[in-house]
Image (cartoon, rainbow, N blue to C red):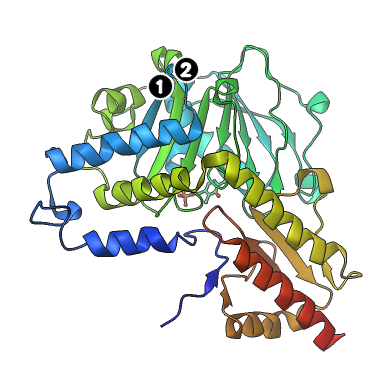
Amino acid sequence: MSRAFNFSAGPATLPESVLRQAQAQMLEFGDAGASIVELSHRGPEFIGVAQQTEADLRSLLSIPDDYAVLFTAGGATTTQALLPLNFANPGQTVDYVVTGHWGKTALKQARAGVVVNIAASGEADGYRAIPARGGWSLSKDAAYVHITANETIHGVEFRDIPETGDVPLFADFSSSIASEPLDISKFGVIYAGAQKNLGPVGIGVVIVRRDLLAREGQPRADIFDYRKQLEAESMLNTPPSWNWYMLGLTVKWMLDEGGVTEFAIRNARKAAALYDVIDNSGGYFRNEVTAEVRSRMNVPFFLHDEALDKEFLAGAKAAGLIGLKGHRALGGMRASIYNAMPEAGVQALADFMRAFQSGHG
Ligand SMILES: *Cc1c(COP(=O)(O)O)cnc(C)c1O
């Protein structure tokens, strides 16, 4: 068996050392006599895992003390639905800036109970750019402004944090959290599903400025109430303990590798290597996103002749490069190059693309 370089958008590649550690501890966690996934989440072993994970995540992301961290089941989409319930009063306006597929999904989840204002949208241009901040039509008394920091499908990434005055900025960082240093204090809420850049699917994180938790929000069950979840340390019900444990291993790995400063450097190099091949292919490969907002994490690209797509994917697979098929909404290819994708993987893909072009001139 040999592991390929996996460019899947999510669930995505994990560090091999993390998988090996999980494998080694699958049957017995320490000397507990059982796997962590078989032990009570109220027991000392799992409580230890949970607390260490939060401490490591706080350290990795430099999360200020006035921000709470929640570990959530249900994925980023569920968080999208819970944001208006927790942070907007019935009938209050929420502002959404839509820069791709996931911004649109967030918008759909928010419709119930609140007034949704689309403050700006890149849809008319096929989401190839981010509408300039000056042109956004923000509401005066909005509960929050929501953006998608990195659009995983369209490959569009905010490179500056937009100013929203007194209205807190909420951001979906599912596919770019921990990819570079970030000033968390500029945000009201940052959330992410783990399966792109933080670990396995089945768990997510919500980082929320504590004062926002005092907001009344809308009538909701305890299980959907972030205040209640925080009081219960994200264990109002049985948490996805194995996923939480693996998230912890992944965060620890990132710290050991040098943290977000180091990943920012690696990620910039990896993205540059791929965009370079694309831009220097004389139109053989193309990426249509405005250069300044091209994603460092997800690189969508198209072959000049889509009849070659199948052959490209088959050749890539034979070369040990998998997960490159583009999202069905866009077609073409997409290379997701999260923190756990080694530079050697990106180099192998760049080499394969050049060789494919010269072989099919
Ligand atoms: C993957 C993704 C989501 C959806 O995540 P789920 O965990 O499947 O709900 C939302 N937003 C972004 C930016 C994503 O990349």
Within-10-Å neighbours for mark 1: few <14, some 14–19, many 20+: some
Within-10-Å neighbours for mark 2: few <14, some 14–19, many 20+: some
Q: Where does the image place residue 207, in percent across and percent down from the top left?
A: 45, 29
Disc 2 marks a residue whose amino acid type is Asn
Q: Where does the image place residue 55, in percent across and percent down from the top left?
A: 35, 32
Disc 1 marks a residue whose amino acid type is Gln
In the displayed structure, 314 sits above or below 24; it is: below
Q: Earlier in the sequence, mark 1 or mark 2?
A: 2
Check if mark 1's residue and mark 2's residue have beta carbons within 8 Å: yes
Left or right: residue 28 versus residue 181 is left
> From the image, which quarter does the N terminus lie in?
bottom left
When asked about the image quadrant of residue 322, the answer is bottom right
Q: Where does the image place residue 194, in percent across and percent down from the top left?
A: 44, 48
Residue 82 appears in view: no
Q: CA distance from mark 1 to mark 2?
A: 6 Å
Left or right: residue 6 versus residue 302 is left
Q: Residue at x 55, y 52 (%)?
A: 339
In the displayed structure, 258 sits above or below 297; it is: above
Q: Residue at x 56, y 48 (%)?
A: 175
Q: Nearer the viewer, residue 112 or 143?
A: 143
The residue that label 2 is drawn on is 89
* SS class, disc 2: loop
* SS class, disc 1: loop
> From the image, which quarter does the C terminus lie in?
bottom right
Q: Where does the image place residue 72, in percent across and percent down from the top left?
A: 35, 39
In the displayed structure, 31 sits above or below 255; it is: below
Q: Is mark 2 within 8 Å of ligand 1?
A: no
Picture disc at residue 218: 1
